Amino acid sequence: MNENGKFSKKDSSKTQTFNFVEERDLQLKQIMQQIYSALSEKGYNPVNQIVGYILSEDPTYITNYKGARTLISKIDRDELLNSLVRNYLNL
């Protein structure tokens, strides 16, 4: 980018990379925090409920309160597990 904020031909030939994995992990984290909060507010043990959902894929482990069940249904369970393991191992 030049001093005027415009791309020159030379700049446009450079490869730009975006880390979609980190962006998606951030989205998953935000969704899981909302679900955790909804479960806590309803008096459930959020960790136990989320683990129960992950193991069984039974949405009744997640409350409908604040749309938490709808949120969890938008997450692919394999993608969530993949993200959890990567983050746990700091990869």
Image (cartoon, rainbow, N blue to C red):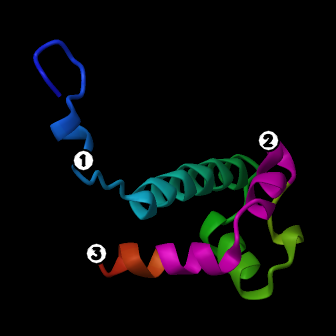
Say left or right for 60 vs 17: right
Indicate the position of residue 77 as horizontal and vertical percent values: 69, 76
- Please report the bounds of the magenta region as a residue range: 64-83
Q: Are marks 3 and 2 in contact (CB under 8 Å)?
A: no
The image quadrant where one finds the C terminus is: bottom left
| Chain-order first, disc 3 or disc 2 | 2
Indicate the position of residue 44 as horizontal and vertical percent values: 72, 61
Tag 3 residue:
90
Q: Secondary structure at mark 1?
A: loop
Instruction: Give above or below for 37 relative to 56.
Output: above
Q: Secondary structure at mark 3?
A: loop
Q: Are marks 2 and 1 in contact (CB under 8 Å)?
A: no
Say left or right for 4 vs 28: left
For label 2, the crowd category at 10 Å Cα-Cα, with few meaning under 14, some 14 to 19 and many 20 or more, is some
Q: Nearer the viewer, residue 19 or 76?
A: 19
Q: CA distance from mark 2 to mark 1?
A: 46 Å
Residue 69 is a magenta residue? yes
Instruction: Give above or below for 9 relative to 25.
Output: above
For label 3, the crowd category at 10 Å Cα-Cα, with few meaning under 14, some 14 to 19 and many 20 or more, is few
Looking at the rendered structure, the kind of residue marked 3 is Asn
Q: Nearer the viewer, residue 79 or 58?
A: 79
| Chain-order first, disc 2 or disc 1 | 1
Tag 2 residue:
66
Looking at the rendered structure, the kind of residue marked 1 is Ser
Q: Residue sitting at 57 percent across and 52 percent down? A: 33
